[in-house]
């Protein structure tokens, strides 16, 4: 937010005191002159750009303007026929500085990550000079309006921080510069803006240009707005606008809709003005619509032209209607996000077609989230050199370059943090002693340096070095001084020193000194003990440097006889050694130099000692003779590490008496560094290896292995998650995609590998070589299986069929070979000559096969032809004619030259890719930068993507679900929104320093790979994989599947940062039966670890289809007339839509279900507002306790969480403090001050909605119908007493909404889309008064607060207004459709405002206002980007909540005036006051009458307290949104933790039951949890271990609130986890039956037990003494009151709990159960067992009763009860409270509390009785 002094605007010239030239600077011919047209002083800059004339604000680069206004206004006039440049430095929120340049000197738009260049055209008559645009001959004064915030967001995807500096260069006149947060319009006066009622701010007087009377502003001046209101950025020139501005504001203000009686002929049509139009749709500002003046006097009606549509769209429209376009034809190549606005005179009208064009401009469709990719890791080291690997201060991480990426790698977890920004290879690195600043330099261009905030990874400064190339960097210990060494353009050595003390505080680095030297410098280091002293070494020289008085001075050390040595590295010794300087050389010498006396103290030499007959050195000594070349050294307090070219890393004491440790490497050691603690030694080799030697353990660990040359191709393997790459370094390497570690390394010194492919089903790898050989390798035995030489030239293509039966290869001589590879020894089947394109280069997309293995495609026989063949036969075309029509064609050839006839150059095919089928599409990348999609059977062009890259695309890939297209060209990759047919959106990602050779999607489709200079692994943050269009999973008739992994809303929560995106696809109701849906929705996970859908953004989980609905004699009926027209009242004979409601006879049974008129079942509407109950497979309890009596052993103490699946299920009365919400089937009444809860039980199913009477004495709640009831329950509660006063029912499926009348005498209930009924009840007698069936689903209902006889409903494209007539409360309704200007859609929410206003929200994000007295809609505005589900209004304020997670506060005080026909109020008076972003879609909200504070509920299961005054949101209630899988407790019993399918681990306080910590993992489900025992390390170092669905195990630190360790011990989902008693071992089990034993201290898995292979591991427990070697399956636990007993459930065919004695080796006790147990917990303080049931074989291992073993599969009911068994007395008791099966129950260590979970709902029970007080943590005493 801008500072107060910067409002409303800042005159930058006045702020910098231009004219005094103290805060600013000037150069060249700069003078103050008087402009005659403006009649004021201006500044003239008259030098050419090359002459260097400029004005710079502020004066030096160390200063910053600090102006935060996101609009910059430049008032200037270019000199005729001259060039000019406007240069801005803009700082982003993360500290990045981006330079923007605008000039008529530029020919085209160019950009990098930190630099943007825009061509700026200032006149339609701009001339050209030497092919370059120059200023127009009639150059005018111009107002250049730059939206800096949008420019940064669009072009570099960063958030705007402030304007740092401005530089005005070359030939122009400038009046001043202004910054502001307001969007000024320079063409308007205050009177004009008010008269036109436009939502703009007129320009301030000092910014205004004088305009003569009766003349147009545009006749004298030019206004350029950049970006314009268009939301599309396209590269091209920034152009001017010379037309009036109304078209520019279309889409930015609320629109007044025409009055039904208004005439449309007030304005005359004229010739449309020329120029492009791009309306804006800003998410936080009401979207504008054309206004039709309803009250203009005749003199006020102008005669202007119609507003223009987007350039290309408008011309099509003009050609169709024959309009005469007299103005010049507009340019259709805008430079930026949209074209410059084109205006039209005020008051002109706009046609409906143009309105549609304005609302839906032709533009690329962006797809979310943005960014959709995140660089997860890179495989590679070095690039420019294999040096510059640094330790962090604590020695936990290593910093090193990987080509253009700086990588921070944690040595314990191997997790990477990548710093992106460099555009070329990083040549040097430096890290200060405090790890605050990191400096990096790139090789080209001209050594750009970046200074990073090492903690956050933000780039603080980007600047150019005076040296042409930098090869060395060194920080002082405190980070205030940075020194660099490099070469200038003449090849001279340059030493540079910068002051960096102000970096990070808003300042820039300062160049302190620069000097040239004639000596060679190989290494340079700033002394850590004195930042003014440095040392360097090189060929024959060691020099000591000093920085003093702004100069760098050096003094050579007299080396004597060693002056001829080539010295390579140096290091300062410790303090106790007098900071001795150690220098090493190529000859093996190590010199010890006393830097104070400038003398060599000792000279030693590393020599090999040879033994007879041995070619290698055995021992190293110092003496004379040929030495071993030393490349690097590093010192610690007691040792010196030396790396040499013989491949050894040696560790010496400082006296070099003997070698302490040595490690042999595969190649020459190029770099060594000792960690700050001296316990680890980092080393790098010339082969691209990076590792460290652990001195205490004497172990060497390799951190990074990498290719040493560009990577040519890649291949992925599905079953084991492996990646294979081939490189120009003559190696084939196989990597583990999960850990990025190298598994295999195949070297071929004689011949270079070209292509690679995995066998789909066997552990085999195929590789093609430059000699023409194709070899098969076994990945198990690491040997060659077969070798074939069918080719004469290098192998250019290699592909295996997906079914694993065939292999194909091609070569540069045009030969195609087919192999049979189903067996281990593959054999050649066919060889065809002159088939494939000759002289083709190896590429991973040269040969491609379709997913069904039927088709083979390749480029050939020429580069202009794409051939598709039958993969099995490879037959000639002669056999095609005799095949049946259903057979695949044997040969299809497509000439790509014919696909682009308009191109002057012939297009050739470059790369191919098959799409998922059906349909069978083949994607072809051509040399004309186009991707053509062909029908693979007919060759027909299906679609075309032009201008994919600036050059040819050598590699492309399509995701398995056809959602994303991945392309590569040059050093960038692009990800495309492939399903979008017209102009699909794309996102561009850079990071490679060399051209990208190949791209591919990872087997899991959640990541993608790009290779070139290195291997890049990217995470896809977008929606998870879905079935491709046309596949079985996508067809309407296909049964629903559960492959859509974790909750879609969870994914959007974490990755997008926007906390809620609109749904990208309309959910389709399934046609499957409820039974099939139930089986799907009830699944925990599929084989891939995917989980159930989101309740509101995925497919519907439940279909409600009424059976046999019959019409009763006295029931309301739907009346439809056969004829008649007009707008009569519903129910009147003249209305074909008539619907009447008649009073129901008194005496109707209030507590019974009723029969209704027959309604046809309808699909669920496309809006999240509509309630859909979560699907459940469990049935209601037959008999259970409700925990109210004194004899109950369990008392319900607390309910954790809020049901975010409900709608309007929160009520709050601020005056009385009554606050209630729902959780499952419970109504929770909570005291907001003390946190105490009351629980109102009685509903059998999930509660959908609540309503509180206006006097807060009565609460109504509604739930769905269960399996035992035919109607929904509606309970009427007495609020003071907390008792249920009445139970009523009428609706058959679910209740969508409830509402009380203003006098609380009536209650209206609304059924959902399956019920479609409206019922009216008397609250005095609780009798049904009236009921009717509705013709369509209705989403909301509300009583008019000013008239108890009126209520309204909203639904599909209409508002229904109902009136109560007569004493019997009969209803008459009128359906009012939406105006055509608003389009078709669903009205999803409503609320009444000041009489007679009704506000309605739509699923398109619009809010429309109705005058209920006149039954018309008169105002609408764009209030959100997504569906509005909540609307509340009080006084002059309106609150809207949507599924975009946004909650907005609007000022609507002017709306009542806008409905008046003669009102002069401005529609722009409706504006947004505040906005908050929550954690989920808004489903419930209730506010105080003043609208200052309220409570809001979201789909994330959170209730928020919202304060608009403070602009804050505070969590009141937190809970999981998905299924809770585990509850664990800390050893001290002070905290407890939960994990859920949503991937979160939450830590709670046991005393206050408040959420303290949350750990979130993206795209995974957390299935099991364990808390470290008290014996593990120190008590304060508590840890939680969590197992996830991808087989990973993560250890979180509670005290540090961070993840400490990540392991991957399993390939399948983890289902159970436990710590050993000493906390040093973790046991984990997966769903495949494997048990892994791991060490959390080292992260190593040292044993895997496969005794249970094939059966899911459900329970793992550990004790101080081992139990049996094979623990029983199903549910099992150690008995806490007898350590020799195991308590098991599910062992046999009968549902029972058995006690197994480990001593007696037999069962000693059995407790029968009515159903199989799905959860089990034993009290540590008493002999109590808690059991949760599962019926129908839903338990572990799918056990069934013996009666069902020989019969067909049976489905037993499941009771939703928690059973408590007293093992001492044998008594049992069941407790109700959950609305689904109790999947989890856990006793707290204190034995006082019992936790139970059903889906996402957690209930906390208090254990009553004397045994609860004596509970103990741990196993507890044995109770007799």
Image (cartoon, rainbow, N blue to C red):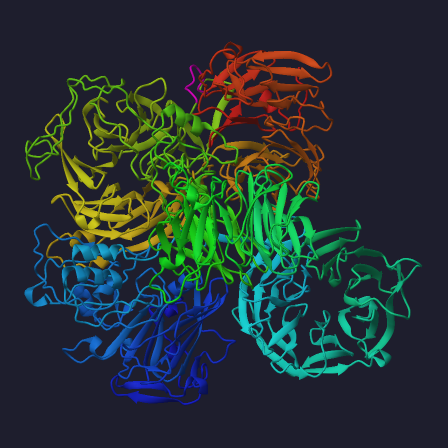
Q: Position of residue 1501 (x, y in %)?
A: 43, 38
- Any part of residue 1439 in sight: yes
- Asked if residue 1789 is among those painted magenta in the image, a careful observer would answer no
Side of 1330 relative to 584 (left or right): left
Above or below residue 535? Residue 360 is above
Question: In the picture, which quadrant includes the N terminus?
Answer: bottom left
Q: Nearer the viewer, residue 1707 or 1664?
A: 1707
Quick check: can you spot residue 1059?
A: no
Q: Is residue 407 above or below residue 1265?
A: below
Comparing 237 with 1154, the one in front is 237
The magenta-colored residue range is 1178-1187
User: Quarter-wise, where is residue 1816 in the image?
Assistant: top right
From what the image shows, is residue 20 above or below residue 1587?
below
Residue found at the far top of this picture:
1747
Left or right, 1198 with respect to 172, comes to right
Q: Nearer the viewer, residue 187 or 266?
A: 266
Q: Where's residue 425, x and y in %?
A: 59, 66
Picture quarter with the C terminus: top right
């Amino acid at each position: 937010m801008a500072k107060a002094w910067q409002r409303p605007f800042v005159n930058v010239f006045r702020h910098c005191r231009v004219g005094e030239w103290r805060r600013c600077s000037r150069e060249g011919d700069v003078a103050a002159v008087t402009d005659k047209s403006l009649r004021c002083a201006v500044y003239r800059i008259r030098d050419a750009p090359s002459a260097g004339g400029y004005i710079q604000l502020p004066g030096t680069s160390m200063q910053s303007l600090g102006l935060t206004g996101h609009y910059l206004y430049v008032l200037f006039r270019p000199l005729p026929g001259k060039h000019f440049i406007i240069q801005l430095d803009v700082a982003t929120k993360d500290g990045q500085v981006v330079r923007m340049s605008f000039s008529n000197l530029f020919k085209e738009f160019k950009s990098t990550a930190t630099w943007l260049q825009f061509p700026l055209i200032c006149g339609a008559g701009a001339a050209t000079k030497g092919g370059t645009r120059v200023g127009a001959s009639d150059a005018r004064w111009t107002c250049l309006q730059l939206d800096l915030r949008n420019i940064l967001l669009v072009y570099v995807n960063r958030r705007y921080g402030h304007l740092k500096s401005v530089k005005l260069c070359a030939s122009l006149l400038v009046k001043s510069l202004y910054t502001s947060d307001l969007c000024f319009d320079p063409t308007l006066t205050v009177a004009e803006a008010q008269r036109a009622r436009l939502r703009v701010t007129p320009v301030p007087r000092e910014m205004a240009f004088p305009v003569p009377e009766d003349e147009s502003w545009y006749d004298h001046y030019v206004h350029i707005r950049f970006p314009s209101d268009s939301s599309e950025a396209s590269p091209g020139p920034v152009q001017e606008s010379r037309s009036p501005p109304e078209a520019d504001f279309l889409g930015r203000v609320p629109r007044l809709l025409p009055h039904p009686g208004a005439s449309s002929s007030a304005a005359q049509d004229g010739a449309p003005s020329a120029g492009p139009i791009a309306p804006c749709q800003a998410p936080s500002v009401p979207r504008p619509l054309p206004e039709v003046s309803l009250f203009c006097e005749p003199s006020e009606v102008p005669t202007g032209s119609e507003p223009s549509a987007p350039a290309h769209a408008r011309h099509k429209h003009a050609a169709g209607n024959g309009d005469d376009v007299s103005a010049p034809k507009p340019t259709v190549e805008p430079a930026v996000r949209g074209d410059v606005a084109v205006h039209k005179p005020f008051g002109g009208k706009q046609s409906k077609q143009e309105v549609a064009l304005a609302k839906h401009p032709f533009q690329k469709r962006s797809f979310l989230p943005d960014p959709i990719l995140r660089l997860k890791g890179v495989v590679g080291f070095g690039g420019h050199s294999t040096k510059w690997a640094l330790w962090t201060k604590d020695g936990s991480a290593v910093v090193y370059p990987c080509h253009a990426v700086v990588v921070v790698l944690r040595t314990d977890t191997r997790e990477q943090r990548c710093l992106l920004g460099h555009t070329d290879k990083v040549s040097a690195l430096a890290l200060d002693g405090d790890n605050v600043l990191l400096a990096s330099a790139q090789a080209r261009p001209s050594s750009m340096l970046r200074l990073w905030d090492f903690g956050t990874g933000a780039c603080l400064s980007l600047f150019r070095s005076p040296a042409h190339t930098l090869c060395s960097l060194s920080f002082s210990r405190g980070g205030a001084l940075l020194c660099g060494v490099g070469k200038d353009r003449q090849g001279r050595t340059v030493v540079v020193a910068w002051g960096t003390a102000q970096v990070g505080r808003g300042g820039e680095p300062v160049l302190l000194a620069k000097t040239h030297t004639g000596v060679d410098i190989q290494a340079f280091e700033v002394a850590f003990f004195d930042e003014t002293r440095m040392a360097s070494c090189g060929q024959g020289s060691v020099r000591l440097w000093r920085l003093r008085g702004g100069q760098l001075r050096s003094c050579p050390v007299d080396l004597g006889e060693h002056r001829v040595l080539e010295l390579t590295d140096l290091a300062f010794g410790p303090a106790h050694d007098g900071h001795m300087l150690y220098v090493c050389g190529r000859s093996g010498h190590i010199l010890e130099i006393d830097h104070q006396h400038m003398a060599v103290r000792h000279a030693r030499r590393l020599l090999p000692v040879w033994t007879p007959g041995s070619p290698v050195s055995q021992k190293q000594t110092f003496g004379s003779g040929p030495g071993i070349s030393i490349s690097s050294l590093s010192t610690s307090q007691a040792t010196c590490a030396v790396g040499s070219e013989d491949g050894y890393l040696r560790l010496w004491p400082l006296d070099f008496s003997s070698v302490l440790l040595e490690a042999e490497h595969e190649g020459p050691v190029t770099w060594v560094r000792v960690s700050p603690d001296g316990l680890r030694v980092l080393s790098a080799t010339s082969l691209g290896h990076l590792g460290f030697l652990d001195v205490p353990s004497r172990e060497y660990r390799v951190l990074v292995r990498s290719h040493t040359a560009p990577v040519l191709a890649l291949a992925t393997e599905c079953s084991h998650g492996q990646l294979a790459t081939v490189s120009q370094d003559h190696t084939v390497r196989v990597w583990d995609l999960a850990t990025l570690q190298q598994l295999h390394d195949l070297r071929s010194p004689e011949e270079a590998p070209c292509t690679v492919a995995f066998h789909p089903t066997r552990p085999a790898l195929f590789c093609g070589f430059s000699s023409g050989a194709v070899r098969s390798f076994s990945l198990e035995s690491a040997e060659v299986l077969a070798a074939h030489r069918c080719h004469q030239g290098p192998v250019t293509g290699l592909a295996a069929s997906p079914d694993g039966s065939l292999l194909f290869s091609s070569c540069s001589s045009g030969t195609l070979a087919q192999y049979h590879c189903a067996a281990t020894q593959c054999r050649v089947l066919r060889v065809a000559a002159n088939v494939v394109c000759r002289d083709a280069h190896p590429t991973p997309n040269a040969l491609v096969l379709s997913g069904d293995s039927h088709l083979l495609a390749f480029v050939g026989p020429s580069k202009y032809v794409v051939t598709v063949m039958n993969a099995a036969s490879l037959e000639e075309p002669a056999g095609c004619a005799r095949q049946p029509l259903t057979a695949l064609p044997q040969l299809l050839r497509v000439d790509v030259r014919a696909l682009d006839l308009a191109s002057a150059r012939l297009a050739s095919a470059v790369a191919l890719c098959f799409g998922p089928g059906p349909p069978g599409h083949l994607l072809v990348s051509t040399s004309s930068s186009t991707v053509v999609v062909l029908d693979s059977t007919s060759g027909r062009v299906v679609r075309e993507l032009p201008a994919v890259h600036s050059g040819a695309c050598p590699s492309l890939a399509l995701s398995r679900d056809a959602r994303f297209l991945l392309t590569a060209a040059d050093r960038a990759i692009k990800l495309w929104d492939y399903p979008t047919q017209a102009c699909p959106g794309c996102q561009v990602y850079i990071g490679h320093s060399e051209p990208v050779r190949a791209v591919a999607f990872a087997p899991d489709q959640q990541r993608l790979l790009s290779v070139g200079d290195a291997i890049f692994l990217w995470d896809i943050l977008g929606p998870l994989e879905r079935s491709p269009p046309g596949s079985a999973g996508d067809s309407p008739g296909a049964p629903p599947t559960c492959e859509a992994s974790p909750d879609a809303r969870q994914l959007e929560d974490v990755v997008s940062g926007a906390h809620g995106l609109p749904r990208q696809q309309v959910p389709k109701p399934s046609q499957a039966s409820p039974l099939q849906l139930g089986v799907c929705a009830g699944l925990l996970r599929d084989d891939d670890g995917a989980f159930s859908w989101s309740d509101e953004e995925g497919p519907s989980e439940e279909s409600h289809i009424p059976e046999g609905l019959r019409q009763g004699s006295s029931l309301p009926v739907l009346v439809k007339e056969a004829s008649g027209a007009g707008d009569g009242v519903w129910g009147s004979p003249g209305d074909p839509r008539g619907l009447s409601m008649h009073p129901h006879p008194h005496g109707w049974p209030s507590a019974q279900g009723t029969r209704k008129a027959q309604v046809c079942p309808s699909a669920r509407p496309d809006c999240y507002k509509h309630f859909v109950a979560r699907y459940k497979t469990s049935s209601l309890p037959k008999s259970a306790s409700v925990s109210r009596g004194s004899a109950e052993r369990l008392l319900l103490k607390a309910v954790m969480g809020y049901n975010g699946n409900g709608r309007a299920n929160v009520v709050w009365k601020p005056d009385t403090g009554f606050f209630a919400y729902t959780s499952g089937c419970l109504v929770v009444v909570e005291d907001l001050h003390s946190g105490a809860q009351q629980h109102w039980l009685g509903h059998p199913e999930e509660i959908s909605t609540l309503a509180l009477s206006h006097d807060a004495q009565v609460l109504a709640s509604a739930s769905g119908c269960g399996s035992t009831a035919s109607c929904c329950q509606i309970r009427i509660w007495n609020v003071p007493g907390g008792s249920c006063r009445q139970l009523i029912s009428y609706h058959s499926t679910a209740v969508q909404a409830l509402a009380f009348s203003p006098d609380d005498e009536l209650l209206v209930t609304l059924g959902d889309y399956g019920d479609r009924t409206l019922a009216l009840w008397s609250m005095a007698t609780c009798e049904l008064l009236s009921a009717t069936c509705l013709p369509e689903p209705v989403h909301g209902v509300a009583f008019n607060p000013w008239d108890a006889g009126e209520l309204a409903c909203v639904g599909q494209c209409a508002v229904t207004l109902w009136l109560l007539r007569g004493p019997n409360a009969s209803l008459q309704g009128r359906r009012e459709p939406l105006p055509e200007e608003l389009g078709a859609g669903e009205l999803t929410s409503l609320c009444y405002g000041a009489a007679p206003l009704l506000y309605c929200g739509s699923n398109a994000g619009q809010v429309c206002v109705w005058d209920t007295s006149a039954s018309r809609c008169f105002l609408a505005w764009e209030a959100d980007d997504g569906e509005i589900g909540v609307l509340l209004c009080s006084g002059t304020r309106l609150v809207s909540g949507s599924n975009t997670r946004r909650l907005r506060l609007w000022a609507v005080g002017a709306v009542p005036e806008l409905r008046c026909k003669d009102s002069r109020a401005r529609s722009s008076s409706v504006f947004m006051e505040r906005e908050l972003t929550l954690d989920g879609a808004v489903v419930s909200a209730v506010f105080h009458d003043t609208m200052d504070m309220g409570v809001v509920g979201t789909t994330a299961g959170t209730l928020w307290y919202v304060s608009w005054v403070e602009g804050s949101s505070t969590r009141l209630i937190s809970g999981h949104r998905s299924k809770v899988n585990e509850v664990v407790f800390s050893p001290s019993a002070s905290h407890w933790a939960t994990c859920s399918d949503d991937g979160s681990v939450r830590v709670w306080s046991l005393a206050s039951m408040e959420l303290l910590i949350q750990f979130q993992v993206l795209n995974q489900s957390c299935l099991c949890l364990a808390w470290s025992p008290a014996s593990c390390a120190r008590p304060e170092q508590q840890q939680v271990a969590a197992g996830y669905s991808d087989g990973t195990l993560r250890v979180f630190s509670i005290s540090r609130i961070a993840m400490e360790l990540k392991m991957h011990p399993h390939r399948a989902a983890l289902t159970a986890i436990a710590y050993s008693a000493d906390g040093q071992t973790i046991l984990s089990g997966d769903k495949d039956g494997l048990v892994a034993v791991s060490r959390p201290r080292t992260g190593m898995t040292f044993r895997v037990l496969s005794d249970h292979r094939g059966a899911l591991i459900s329970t793992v427990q550990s004790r101080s003494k081992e139990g049996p070697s094979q623990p029983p399956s199903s549910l099992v636990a150690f008995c806490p009151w007898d350590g020799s007993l195991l308590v098991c459930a599910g062992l046999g065919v009968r549902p029972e709990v058995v006690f197994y004695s480990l001593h007696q080796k037999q069962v000693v006790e059995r407790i029968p159960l009515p159903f199989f147990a799905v959860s089990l917990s034993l009290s540590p303080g008493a002999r109590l067992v808690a059991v949760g049931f599962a019926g129908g074989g839903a338990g572990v291992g799918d056990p069934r009763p013996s009666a069902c073993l020989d019969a067909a599969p049976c489905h037993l009911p499941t009771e939703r009860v928690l059973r408590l068994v007293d093992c001492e007395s044998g008594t049992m008791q069941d407790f109700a409270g959950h609305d689904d099966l109790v999947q989890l129950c856990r006793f707290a260590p204190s034995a006082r509390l019992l936790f139970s979970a059903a889906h996402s709902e957690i209930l906390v029970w208090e254990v009553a009785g004397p045994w609860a007080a004596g509970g103990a943590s741990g196993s507890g005493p044995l109770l007799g």
